[in-house]
Image: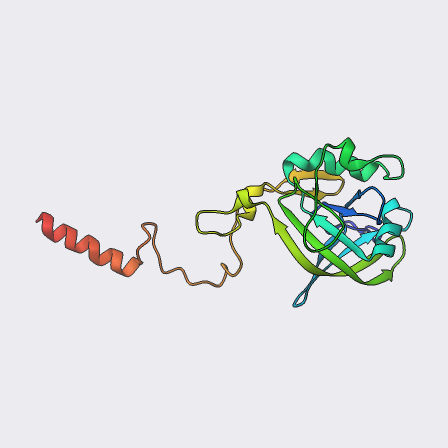
Amino acid sequence: MGKESWKPGNMLYPVPAVMVSCQRPGEKANIVTVAWAGTICSDPAMLSISVRPERYSYDIISETKEFVVNLVTTDLTRACDWCGVRSGRDYDKFKEMKLTEYKSEYMDTPAIDESPVNIYCKVKKIEKLGSHHMFIAEVVGVTVDDKYMDEKGRFDLRATNLMAYSHGEYFALGKKLGKFGYSVKKNTKGSSGKSKKSGGKSSKKSRNKKK
């Protein structure tokens, strides 16, 4: 077994494919599919999206300085793909994909109501990098679908069935492998949920009773 050397390329996969909504005042809202998106800061909450300058949405976002990142579920995958290969110059994407505009308190640009998570962003800076220009934005608000709230009042993101994009293909997210910090957390519980030490004592008491 060995390694092959390739020329530089984008091989950082999988990544989220998101549907970004944008709108000029007085015009129809548009959706652009973006795979180059990511978190860049937690305080203040900030993210980035990278868009080709020739895309119809590029000028809209550049002028309005705002956009909404809408997370994509497995049910929205076809709409996500379609919005990535069709131009808003030729189509009303909300209408064509039978999606619903959601107006929030955060900005005039609508979110996609069918998306479980909508992230409202204000552009702080545009980095002209090459094939893509990066919009660095601050998150000014978030809306979530309340049907994914659990009995404890927490939002269950895993229940939304998000999808991911990898090297030209879409995938449903797989099984849970662990949680943040699990690799260094001390495991003091056995399979029964009790500590191994107390479990041993309980077993001994049970044997004594049987005698």
Question: Camera-side residue: 4 or 197?
Answer: 197
The relative height of residue 92 versus residue 110 in the rendered view (above or below) is above
Is residue 6 in view from this perspective? yes
Residue occupying the far right of the picture: 54
In the rendered image, residue 55, in percent from the top left (x then y), is placed at: 88, 46
Type of colouring = rainbow
Front one among 49 and 112:
112
Q: Residue 182 location in percent, x, y?
A: 49, 58
Q: Using residue 100 as the reference point, say whether residue 59 is left or right of it.
A: right
Picture coordinates of residue 163 (x, y %)? 65, 41
Tell me which corner region of the image, top left, top right, bottom left or bottom right, holds residue 204.
bottom left
The quadrant where residue 158 appears: top right
Q: Which image quarter: residue 86?
A: top right
Residue lying at the far bottom in this picture: please name it.
Answer: 43
**Residue in view at x 51 percent, y 61 percent:** 181
Q: Is residue 13 visible?
A: no
Picture coordinates of residue 52 (x, y %)? Answer: 87, 50
Residue in the image at 66% along x and 57% along y: 141
> Would residue 210 be found to the left or right of residue 141 on screen?
left
* Number of callouts: 0
Q: Nearer the viewer, residue 210 or 88?
A: 88
Can you name the residue that lies furthest to the left here?
A: 211
For the view shown, which residue lies furthest in the front direction?
Answer: 26
Residue at horizontal 65%, vertical 68%? 43
The structure residue drawn at horizontal position 75% and vertical position 43%, both measured from the top left corner, is 167
Q: Is residue 30 above or below residue 66?
A: above
